[in-house]
Amino acid sequence: MLVAWPTEGTLATVLKLFHIALAYLTVAGFLLRAFWALTASPLREARLVKIAPHVIDTLLLVLGVMLALNLSMSPFSGWLGAKLIGLLAYIGFGVLTMRGGTRPLKLLGLAGALLSVGYIFAVAFTRSPWPLAAA
């Protein structure tokens, strides 16, 4: 069953817009930190660089849960469940990117993370766990 996306002017719309903005922000931050990880930049050791992603990702997750509750959706079924599986893959590949012992491992992590986040975005836009089939 497809759930209608909220109409403009509702709380869900505001939540959705902040959720989308945070999603783009977290990917941009990840790309910057990945670049620093690949170049062994000392900038990646800054306190703000270590704390900000956790704050952004926590807000992103909280808003996602609030949206799911607002739309009466189960987080473990359909396209929302697919996004959560993609999120787990993104986290795993992100850890590999940041902590991989060699440059090839970090590059593998980066490629996997980008594919995962691309899948998450595609699922979000199509509201289908199989976004290529929905296109």
Image (cartoon, helix red, strand yellow):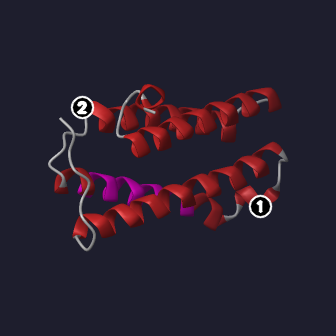
**Which disc is residue 77 wearing?**
2
Main SS of the magenta segment?
helix
**Could you say whether the residue bearing mark 2 is in a helix, strand or loop?**
loop
- The residue shown at (63%, 57%) is 29
Find the magenta span and give its range.
Answer: 52-66
**Which disc is residue 43 wearing?**
1
Instruction: Mark yes or no: residue 55 visible.
Output: no
Label 1 and label 2: CA atoms lie apart by 40 Å
Q: Residue furthest left?
A: 72
Q: Is residue 64 magenta?
A: yes
Q: Quadrant of residue 79?
A: top left
Mark 2: amino acid = Ser
- The residue shown at (72%, 47%) is 34
Q: Residue furthest front?
A: 135
Q: Where does the N terminus fall, quadrant-wise?
A: top left
Name the foreground residue: 34 vs 126: 126
